[in-house]
Amino acid sequence: MNEKYDVAVVGAGPAGSIAARAAARSGAKVLLLDKRHELGVPVQCGEALGEDVLRELRVKPDSRWAVHKVNVAKIVSPSGIAVYMSEKAAGGKIGYILDRKIFDKHLATLAADAGSDIRVGTVVDGLLSDGGKVRGVRARGPNGRTEVCADVIIAADGVMSRVARWAGINTVLKLDDLESGAQFQMVGIEFESPTTMEYYLSSKLAPGGYVWIFPKGKDMANVGLGVLASRAEHRPIDYLRNFVNSRPNLQKGRVIEINAGGVPVGGPVKETVRDGLIIVGDAARHVNPLTGGGIDYAMRAGDIAGEVAAKAVAEGNTSKKRLSEYQRRWMKLFGKRLGKYLKAKNVIINFSDAELDELAEAVQGVKFERISLSALLRVLIKSHPKLLWKLRGPM
Amino acid sequence: MKVDASTCMRCGACASVCPLNLIEVSDAQVKVGDKCTDCGACAKACPVGAIEIERKI
Ligand SMILES: Cc1cc2nc3c(=O)[nH]c(=O)nc-3n(C[C@H](O)[C@H](O)[C@H](O)COP(=O)(O)OP(=O)(O)OC[C@H]3O[C@@H](n4cnc5c(N)ncnc54)[C@H](O)[C@@H]3O)c2cc1C
């Protein structure tokens, strides 16, 4: 079979579905493909998302998928010193814990409502190209093999990022740039407060990463961790079991879901456009290297990508030069910020547990009026000259 | 490399670090191209330890 679309989007995660919605809204004929038979499943995510991106991209929060609200972050040092950041009661920002199984389907529905075609259970396993220019994808699905020609391919294929590599852009991750993560969704547990996200830092609990507890109800939470693949001495899932077994408040709970996944934490890829190709979201490593959060950036990048792709098709010019509008816009929107967090991560993951304790002690009493990573970094730098010295430069 | 299908969660962490882009992960299976050199990166990346490397002696 041979088909023709203006824009083909590979991967229907947050990046791909928002890209498909944006491209279809801008008038393009769009096909969204995903290898998954059920979008959003299996979950590979802690499911925490700030409200800003939903508001800005006009995705109206719905209790079916924005299942829980949080407004406090508690960060715990290796020896147990806690630093709190709270949103103000009035006018503070809402943090959501999502249900990605519903959320991802909802975003795909928005793409469909905008006019995009969708094909699930369909693996893209190669590119069609023409003298260096990408002109389509090869795929296999429930109805056999197909070739889809498209003027622009949007690679939203997540952490694996194979599409970009077929096009000659090296997105392979070094083990130093991959957080390998495991998570239990647990019920029947106790924690400090159902509105507090907890983060635990320690080379013993999670070398080069951290443990999180993100509440999803009064006795239910995502309990997970990421460890740097180059530093892990055990399987991430074993670190997680150890953590859970060492905490009386978790020990007595039950695991109703096991999740796993990789998070790219080496900063964005340098080249995110080629003739006829745009790379978005995890595939472009659009992830905060310090926290591992990527849903927000994936959606924002997808929105820009879809719009630029559709405009380029309408103008009859899908060259790298034309598509570089996308690269300029995501760089301006969040590229510098990710660069700053990458730098901070590279310093912080090399701190010893004793140094982390010192840092926590130094900022313990500070009253943060927002959950803000950059505010936290600023205070850390002020109160700890060694960090300032290590981070000196364009922060 | 050998993948234990019952342990594997199809997350794709292995594919993200494969220097030769040989790993395809789908709902049904993990397929590995025949040029695999058993470098072991995938096994280190796997969150659940589903990958075994058989060292050729
Ligand atoms: C353990 C863990 C915890 C995390 N916690 C958080 C968190 O709390 N908050 C946060 O913001 N981020 C978190 N992240 C990161 C977040 O999950 C990602 O950044 C986000 O999902 C990226 O969206 P995406 O659309 O780029 O990719 P994905 O959501 O990964 O979507 C990619 C899609 O492409 C499809 N696909 C891939 N290859 C092909 C192919 N060849 N053919 C067809 N389809 C294909 C996949 O099936 C998938 O549906 C976490 C990640 C992990 C692993």
Image (tube, helix red, strand yellow):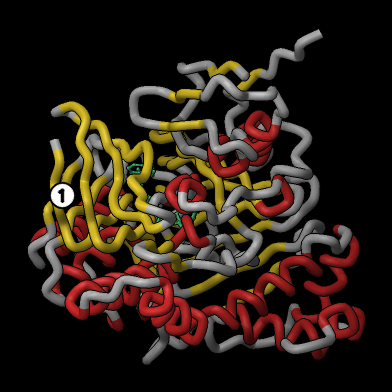
Task: Find residue A113 and report its image quarter.
Answer: bottom left
> Which residue ends up furthest to the front in the rendered image?
A131
Taking the image as drawn, is residue A69 in sight?
yes
Q: Is residue A90 left or right of residue A106?
A: right
Pick the quarter of the image with the N terminus of chain A.
Answer: top left
The residue sitting at 55% across, 88% down in the picture is A369
Q: Which of A189/A133 is in front?
A: A133
Disc 1, ligand 1: is the CB inside 8 Å? no
The residue sitting at 15% across, 49% down in the picture is A118
Relative image position of residue A373 (x, y in whole percent): 61, 78
Tell me the subunit letter for badge 1: A
Q: Which of A352/A189 is in front?
A: A352
Q: Is residue A212 left or right of residue A6?
A: right
The residue sitting at 65% across, 74% down in the picture is A341
Relative image position of residue A237 (x, y in whole percent): 60, 34
The residue sitting at 73% across, 83% down in the picture is A365
Classify mark 1: helix, strand or loop. strand
Count of marks, rendered view: 1
Give the labeled residue for mark 1.
A118
Q: Is residue A104 left or right of residue A186?
A: left
Compared to residue A382, the image places residue A326 above or below, namely above
Taking the image as drawn, is residue A222 in sight?
no
The amino acid beneath tag 1 is Ile
Relative image position of residue A350 (x, y in whole percent): 84, 61
> Which residue ends up furthest to the top in the rendered image?
B57
Q: Which of A34/A277 is in front?
A: A277
Relative image position of residue A240 (x, y in whole percent): 62, 38
